[in-house]
Image (cartoon, rainbow, N blue to C red):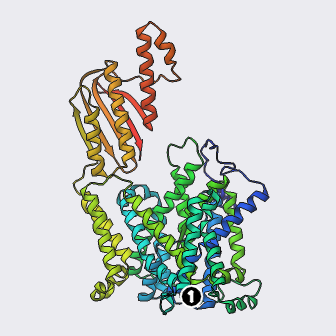
């Protein structure tokens, strides 16, 4: 038993990382206690501000006041456990400063499952979906082709649009079944103004804490306009100092309903992709010379998140994931130590046993919650649009994006469309996000039929720069590659051709072959002749070469400059000879 425990707790070898200038404490560094408490306190405060998603889930499930407090407290406890596990470095946990929050993505699907099949089915769906995901973790990089940025962008955009109705209703008082309230609208606007002002004109620290600043401004406006429920504060007096988080929640046994598990698994796949992205961001921010993702670290982070979500499911809660806002806070503070996650998670777990904390979250005025939701909706819509346009779009991808958004919006605008849908399909068609997501995935798969991921062309011109750029741009649009990577590849291959021709290494036609696999763009030049010597390095003194009367030294120097440019533009370069032909392979990370 001791040997097994030692094996589990023994982490894999940590790769060497070059510390960036802006990072004060690296992943493995242990900051002083005062610094650790100060930074972890900021992270914990931000977690409380983002517990608005717990309030939304509790309201959607129709929970009462006491049950909502328990819902918030239970969420804090398990998210704290997940945060601690993210900071713990072992064979199965990553050891990174990631902080977990509840995710808004699965909310609509979760509520639909509860309404159709009951809470037990929703609990089973969360548990089963994340168990399946744990088995799929080693294959996540291969699944990227089926979840390209434009598909994920459609999901995020539709998620933002789904939040508009809830946010606006709370902002103007319609959520309470009365008419539009000018006072509530003013509070919501004040909340929004506070968030926007801090985000646009504030320093990095103010931008990170923008939601907190907006919440404080909105709450003060609520007090001034007489909208704050002072009687509710009396409930704080009746709260015990400490209490079990789950004391007011009665949970059924989990039920495993296939038509509940399937839609939730699809939603969780998008959540896993987001977890991958956040983990990669942490990896990049901690390595000045980052070139390739530490997929071992990423996999352990996703596995840890799946385990946390299984605990959330067993507690009757919606699933969560790493918060990008907390990554921004870590970057702004310069404290990227994994000990921040350990301390933040411990604080979250402690706060979960203090009912007054959850009560304060629950007492957040409705228009303040509405203002935060409107901000979140706007942010998600723009983020979705940025993801969609981060790739080069051809006609097929344009149809994938456009039709999926139209289908999703149709259900938001005309929900009666699904009234005649079969009962078994209600879990799926009851959510505009789910239908739009499935449409995007389906169209992406359909339009991938017949697309070759490898293309070749024999270069015909003596100066083929324009020909190479046109060839790469054409296939980049078909494949949906990032424009920046395709442009860089065009520059590198053009420079390589000029170098090969200038050195008279080419003795026949040159064939350019390009391959794309969602992870890398690989370009290969194959020709009869001699391979390019890439072994030359170091700095080149151009002034000395120009003053030197020896033309051969100048030529050699220019060759060295060209080789250096090629290796700088590409992430990996190889030159070799095979079967009587020389080859130059340039690899670009996508």
Front residue (pair 204, 22): 204
Left/right placement of residue 302 relative to residue 362 reads left
Residue under pointer 1: 251
Q: Is residue 260 visible?
A: yes
Whether residue 230 sits left or right of residue 521 in the image: it is: right
Determine the residue positioned at 71% across, 91% down: 235
Residue 259 drawn above or below residue 136: below
| Residue 465 percent across, percent down from the top left | 29, 32
Question: Which x, y percent locates residue 534?
Answer: 43, 25
Indicate whether 343 appears above or below 336: below
Mark 1, secondary structure of its residue: loop
- Residue 23 vs 366, above or below: the answer is above
Estimate how packed mark 1 is, as few (under 14), some (14 to 19) or many (20 or more) residues with alpha carbons within 10 Å. Answer: few
Percent position of residue 412, x then y: 35, 79
Residue 40 left/right relative to 544: right
Q: Nearer the viewer, residue 77 or 137?
A: 77
Residue drawn at x 36%, y 29% as measured from the top left: 495
**What x and y, as percent, mark residue 52?**
57, 77
| Quadrant into which the N terminus falls | bottom right
In this view, the residue farthest toward the top is 549
Q: Is residue 493 above or below residue 333?
A: above
Q: Is residue 317 visible?
A: no
Q: Quadrant of residue 401?
A: bottom left
Q: Nearer the viewer, residue 520 or 66?
A: 66
């Amino acid at each position: 038993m001791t040997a097994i425990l030692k094996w589990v707790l023994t982490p894999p070898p940590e790769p060497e990382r070059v510390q960036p200038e802006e990072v004060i404490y690296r992943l493995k560094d242990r900051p002083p206690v005062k610094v650790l408490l100060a930074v972890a306190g900021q992270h914990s405060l931000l977690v409380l501000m983002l517990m608005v998603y717990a309030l939304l889930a509790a309201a959607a499930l129709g929970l009462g006041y006491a049950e909502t407090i328990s819902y918030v407290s239970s969420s804090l406890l398990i998210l704290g456990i997940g945060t601690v596990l993210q900071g713990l470095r072992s064979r199965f946990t990553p050891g990174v400063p990631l902080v977990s929050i509840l995710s808004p993505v699965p909310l609509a699907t979760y509520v639909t499952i509860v309404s159709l099949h009951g809470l037990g089915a929703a609990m089973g769906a969360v548990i089963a979906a994340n168990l399946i995901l744990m088995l799929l973790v080693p294959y996540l990089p291969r699944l990227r082709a089926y979840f390209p940025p434009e598909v994920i962008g459609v999901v995020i955009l539709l998620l933002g649009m789904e939040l508009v109705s809830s946010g606006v209703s709370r902002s103007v008082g319609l959520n309470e079944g009365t008419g539009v309230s000018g006072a509530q609208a003013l509070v919501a606007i004040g909340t929004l103004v506070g968030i926007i002002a801090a985000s646009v004109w504030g320093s990095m620290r103010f931008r990170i804490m923008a939601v907190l600043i907006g919440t404080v401004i909105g709450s003060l406006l609520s007090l001034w306009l007489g909208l704050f429920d002072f009687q509710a504060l009396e409930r704080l007096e009746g709260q015990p100092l400490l209490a079990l988080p789950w004391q007011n929640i009665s949970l059924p046994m989990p039920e495993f309903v296939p038509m509940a598990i399937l839609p939730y698994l699809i939603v969780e796949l998008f959540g896993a992709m987001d977890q991958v992205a956040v983990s990669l961001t942490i990896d990049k921010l901690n390595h000045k010379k980052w070139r390739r993702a530490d997929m071992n670290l990423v996999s352990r982070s996703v596995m840890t998140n799946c385990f946390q979500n299984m605990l959330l499911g067993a507690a009757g809660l919606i699933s969560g994931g790493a918060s990008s806002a907390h990554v921004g806070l870590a970057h702004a503070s310069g404290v990227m130590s994994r000990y921040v996650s350990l301390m933040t998670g411990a604080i979250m777990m402690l706060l979960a046993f203090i009912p007054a904390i959850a009560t304060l979250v629950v007492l957040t005025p409705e228009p303040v919650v509405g203002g935060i939701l409107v901000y979140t909706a706007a942010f998600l819509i723009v983020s979705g649009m940025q993801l969609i346009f981060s790739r080069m779009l051809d006609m097929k991808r344009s149809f994938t994006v456009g039709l999926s958004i139209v289908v999703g919006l149709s259900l938001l605008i005309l929900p009666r469309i699904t009234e005649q849908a079969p009962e078994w399909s209600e879990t799926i068609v009851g959510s505009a996000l789910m239908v739009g997501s499935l449409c995007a995935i389906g169209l992406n798969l359909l339009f991938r039929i017949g697309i070759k991921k490898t293309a070749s062309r024999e270069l015909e011109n003596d100066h083929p720069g324009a020909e190479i750029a046109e060839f790469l741009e054409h296939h980049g649009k078909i494949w949906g590659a990032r424009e920046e990577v395709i442009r860089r590849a065009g520059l590198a291959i053009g420079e390589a051709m000029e170098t090969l021709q200038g050195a008279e290494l080419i003795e026949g036609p040159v064939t350019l072959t390009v391959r794309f696999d969602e992870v890398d763009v690989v370009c290969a030049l194959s020709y009869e002749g001699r391979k390019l010597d890439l072994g030359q390095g170091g700095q080149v003194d151009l002034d000395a070469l120009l003053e030197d009367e020896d033309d051969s030294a100048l030529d050699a120097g220019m060759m060295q400059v060209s080789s250096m440019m090629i290796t700088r533009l590409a992430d990996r370069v190889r030159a070799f000879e095979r079967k009587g032909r020389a080859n130059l392979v340039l690899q670009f990370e996508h």
